[in-house]
Image (cartoon, rainbow, N blue to C red):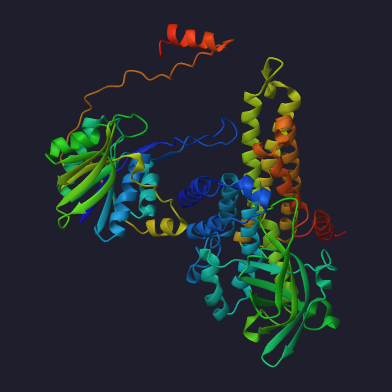
Amino acid sequence: MDFAWSDQQRELLDAVGRFASQQLNYDVIENDRDGVFNHDAWKKCGDFGIQGLLVPTEYGGFGQDPLTTVAALERLGYACKDNGLLFSINAHMWTAVIPLVYNGTEAQKKKYLPGLCNGSLIGGNAMSEPNSGSDAFALATTAIKKDSRYVLNGSKIFVTNGPIADLLVVFATVDKTRGPDGITAFLVEKDSPGMNVARKLEKMGVRTSPMAEVFFENCEVPEENLLGKEGGGAFLFTRSMTWERGCILASAVGAMQRLLETCIRYANERKQAGQSIGKFQLVATKIVDMKLRVESSRHMLYHCAWLSSHRKSVYLEAAMTKLHISDCWVKCCEDAIQIHGGYGYMTEYEVERELRDAIGSKLYSGTSEIQRNIIASLLGL
Amino acid sequence: MKVLVPFKSVPDPNDATVAGAAASMPKSVINPFDEIAIEEALRIRERGEAAEIVGVTIGASAVDEQIRAALAMGVDRAIRIDDSRALDPYAVARILRALIEKEAPHVVIMGKQAVDDDSNQVGQMLAGLLGWPQATFVSKIEFLDNKTRARCTRETDAGLEVVAIELPAIITTDLRLNEPRYVSLPGLMKARRKPIEILSCDQLRVTVRPLTTTLSTSRPPKRAAGTRVDSVEELMAKLRGEAKVL
């Protein structure tokens, strides 16, 4: 078992770190307060090559394997403090880019992937509905075939990147009686007649990543925008979610490492009762626990990605990775605030924002409870 | 026009890794002033005034990482002079002279100094050894008269000085010349196909022996703690009497 990076991987990771620390960390507090998405930073990430990490080179990507990709995203999360930007990038990669790479026709890939890689297009998906969240396949949005078009009707909620997306992967059923086998994915471009991106949703964390409700009212989608097969949506969604669960918290591992270093620095500098607070065992214990969480998260992240790189199924590992890292991330943030005391509660110290950003990780891509259900069922329960 | 950019690997001045938190050695990077020189060369090429940019550095294979970073920024090809000794500015200048005589560039652009030893001598010595004109601490470069001359704006203590120099020449860069681009993934992919030539001092037929020896290095003394004053009057008295700054 070899835990070393190759020279080429190391160069890539260093380049990501340098790029992100120098180019992406401005106006983060203000953008968080105002709920503003940083378009320039998105474009810079596209120019740098983040969005195209996994995409084959013939479609404008860089053909990196899953392990190198999650390591790059981890480095990005370490060096970039804008968790919302990274959340948007993740949504884009796992719910729009990956389904296209796997299920897109040659024409669809040629049309959309280069733009999705270079930052000129923003993608996302629309799955959750007001009455179907964890029970995703109970969705009610319908797609009725009419000549060479599908007509979509229904409403979607919690659509990450909704207000800014150029392309959404929309899930609808062509036949409700078929249950999951009726679910079908469509590529819907922004400004399609009948598609309305409604109000932007205000939320607790990752506030720089915009989210919206999206309504479809007789929205006509040309049949060439069918993604995968009719009725193939559930499988496509499951694959996309497995990728997302395995990879979406790579940047969180980087964020935890950054928090750990921030806390070590603070614990050494801050003096109370005549000594550094790091000398108090109750503080030191918290930092040791943070270190353990970072390391165990990193190992699960890499192992899951390594399995993917070797084309092994990761349905179980992805669920465990997502569950474990999200737990660790939230706990690290709580500890970081506690170590910083009152200062940690203040916006300008940029620790409280981490906690607000972290909490969503126990909800998106399947709640922690759903991950436990998946794991339990795979354990034969 | 061929532009030659010598650059040096230095410990990363921005590396703020907390001891114990990350199991990593201090990283090396391209000397920031040399990075500005590389960026300027790239901009000169992008506006159609240069056809080729050659990057040069001196060191053992450990510096290949910085070479690839330079290639990833956009340098066309690179040369590493394989020498792992601690060289002083005069030795570096003599090696570079030998290489420049072989490569015959139209202009050499390099950082005004390296941030590790702050010597600020190689560019000037190189110009002297070659008998070429030099413009140091440059914050703006324009080529004139069919690229036979360059007009350079220099940053001096007294203000900006504009000089015209005949080419070939040595230009050393100051901080405000430009802001270097970052290495991107497309750049890294292209860099893997670019050639790195490795030469020895023997191949260049140059024998160098450092003229200076570093006897010791030490950290700067810790800053003494400040004192509190109770009144403006006391502050003024201390500034006048003790610090003698007023």
**Residue B72 in view here:** yes
Q: Quadrant of residue A278?
A: top right
Q: Is residue A254 above or below residue A199?
A: above
Residue furthest out toward the top = B241
Q: Is residue A150 above or below residue B42?
A: below
Q: Quadrant of residue B7?
A: top left
Residue name at image x 51 percent, y 70 percent = A114
Residue furthest out toward the front = B233
Residue furthest out toward the right = A381
Quarter occupied by the C terminus of chain A: bottom right
Q: Give whichever of B2, A13 is nearer the camera.
A: B2
Residue name at image x 61 percent, y 29 percent = A265
Residue name at image x 64 percent, y 51 percent = A250
Please indicate whether residue A21 sits to the left or right of residue A375 in the image.
left
Q: Position of residue A287 (x, y in %)?
A: 70, 32
Q: Give whichever of B88, A212 is nearer the camera.
A: A212
Q: Position of residue A299 (x, y in %)?
A: 66, 47
Residue furthest out toward the bottom = A147
Labels in figure, total: 0
Q: Position of residue A27 (x, y in %)?
A: 58, 47
**Residue B94 in view here:** no
Q: Is residue A190 above or below residue A164?
A: below
Q: Give whichever of A126, A25 is nearer the camera.
A: A25
Residue name at image x 73 percent, y 65 percent = A199
Q: Is residue B176 above or below residue A109?
A: above
Q: Position of residue A146 (x, y in %)?
A: 72, 91
Please indicate whether residue A225 sits to the left or right of residue A62 in the image.
right
